[in-house]
Amino acid sequence: MGFFSEFSKAVNGDESGARYSVAGLEVKCPHCGGTRFLEGSALLDSRGMSFMGFDWASKGAMTLTCAHCGHVDWFADGDAIEKLS
């Protein structure tokens, strides 16, 4: 399933997403305290890279979107994230 269908399930009260830990601690949403997240990725752009047309070469980040409220947490080191369920 895609991100939007998973998020729609979460908004409607259905169980979706997975639990994650970073650096040995379970990830919890700082807004609502939720523990289920949808995984994604994003580019960490800079003005210089965009100006030169090298957006594709920018470093990426991993995102975890709370399945309950939609708050997005960004993690620069995706290797530090561990999926629990």
Image (cartoon, rainbow, N blue to C red):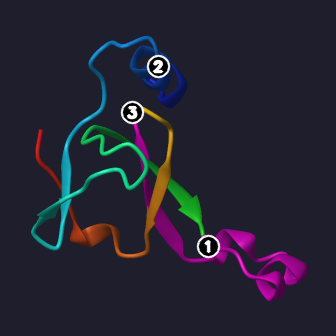
Label 2 crowding class (10 Å Cα cut-off): few <14, some 14-19, many 20+? some
Image coords of residue 79 (percent x, y)? 26, 70
Q: Is residue 64 left or right of residue 33?
A: right
Residue type indicated by callout 2: Val
Secondary element at image label 1: loop
Residue at (82, 88) in percent of width and height: 48
Residue topped by disc 3:
67
First-in-chain label (2 vs 1): 2
Residue topped by disc 1:
44
Outermost residue on the bottom side: it is 48
Outermost residue on the right side: it is 51
Residue type indicated by callout 1: Leu
Q: CA distance from mark 2 to mark 1?
A: 28 Å
Q: Is residue 54 magenta?
A: yes
Vertical position of residue 14 compared to residue 10: above or below: above
Image coords of residue 66 (percent x, y)? 40, 41
- Between 54 and 26, the residue placed more toward the observer is 26
